[in-house]
Amino acid sequence: MNLNYDFGLIGLGVMGRNFILNVVDHDFSASGLDLDREKVEALESEGQGKDVFATTKIKEFVASLKTPRVVMMLVPAGKPVDSVIEDLLPHLEEGDIIIDGGNSHFDDTDRRFEYLKGKGLNFMGIGVSGGSKGARLGPSMMPGGEPDVYKVVQPIFESVAAKVNGEPCVTYLGPKSAGNYVKMVHNGIEYALMQLISESYDFLKRAGGLSNAELAKVFSDWNKGRLASFLVEITAEIFQKKDELGEGDLVDAILDKAKQKGTGKWTSQHALDLGMPIPVIDISVTMRGLSSQKDNRVSASKLYMEPRSTGSIDKQQAIKMAEAGLYFSYINSYAQGLALLSVVSDEKEYNLNLADIAKIWRGGCIIRAGLLEKIRSAFASDQNLANLMLSTDFVDDLNDSQAAVRELVVSSIAQGIPMPAHSACLAYFDAFRSGRLPTNLIQAQRDHFGSHTYERIDKEGIFHTDW
Ligand code: 6PG
């Protein structure tokens, strides 16, 4: 056993195994730890001939690493992270670096950062996106922590990250939990894009009458245009998959109840705390909850009639409408998520660079999309852009596609097809572009029933009226 491994990884599930193999493929040596013998053996067998070592013993694992030790954890978020940290503590020395690569809550990361700092240890929270395939071939990574500590691990992370135009999809983002926060919002946007795509599917299938084969063709065509993105690409593949356990296509055999691990919900929870509107993410979390009420939905489906048919829609017209509607709502989803990041950046003193974030999301991660290059460039030319919709680069895109999204939403409502995420995007857009909202009336009502006061449009000061 070499006693000088460059990188240590705890948690040799598929994701961890793939990540460590990716590290050793880039000329670094690496050591892995897992309590499960089978996982250790799986790494040993896949890593044959490579500079990788695996063990079930923590002492042996720590001893195999060169100092300062770099130990990354890829274990489930929550308690497992704390218990791995406690197990490691007796073996580590001042200056060693612990990295949490899981989807940890930002508050947990801040707490762990302070706790380990008190023990002379360095801690980083690094969001890793791209699933097990991404871990092997190049993920997108969102690091937060001390910049000097990041410098130590930078060569490893830049080597293993996905590359777009030769640029690695990883960059230092900010202090403490900045990386986990950005990854959480990434996941919130991921929830939104997935909900939007599933609504497009529903519309094309129910209103446009498209078969799975036709849907596969549509999504694959979309992936060659302005909607080019990982989620559109895999959607085209999903529609082509036959069911190996039954007749027909696999997608039709899958139960329509969406699970969730919590990152989308955390995004909405914290956005509400900050008073930041991200309705497309909120509704996407809500729809996962509603999808889980399968039994109630089936009961209700027997009680309520479908709206009277409004006549069929021409297939080509439906595809055109759905494409433009999805493009409009894609822009909206990134705009809402990034607007939250711009506010939290000040609030939590992360000092985020939104152009950098868009840049490292262009490859490797689940929300990668061609559109992110244009988003990167918009934030690069205006560092203080509060909302993507205020960038002149997006005005034509949104103006040109707004008629389609309106038609899509109206047509879906008329036919009883739920389109909540597209509707949320459209409503957000309409509210955001309204110089005057009806909120003057809410202020009047608050003052009427509770003397909560109001401001005026024509005079400075705080007013109250005896209504
Ligand atoms: C990624 C993903 C990943 C996440 C899954 C599942 O970026 O690779 O975001 O981190 O765990 O997407 O999330 P849900 O179970 O909440 O859908």
Image (cartoon, rainbow, N blue to C red):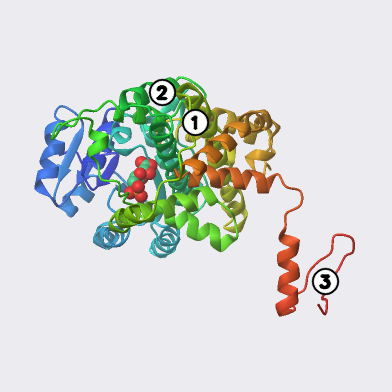
Q: Residue at x 29, y 62 (%)?
A: 79
How many tags in the picture? 3
Which quadrant contains ligand 1?
A: top left
Considering only order in the chain, which callout, 1 or 3, is on the residue closer to the N terminus?
1
Element class at badge 2: helix
Spatial CA distance of label 1 from label 2 is 10 Å
Q: Residue at x 88, y 65 (%)?
A: 460
Q: Nearer the viewer, residue 290 or 360?
A: 290
Give residue 136's position: percent from left, percent from top.
28, 32
Q: Amino acid at mark 1?
A: Ala
Which residue position holds label 3? Answer: 462
Q: Residues within 10 Å of mark 2 (few under 14, many from 20)?
A: some
Which residue position holds label 2? Answer: 218
Q: Are marks 3 and 1 in contact (CB under 8 Å)?
A: no
Give residue 462's position: percent from left, percent from top.
82, 71
Element class at badge 3: loop
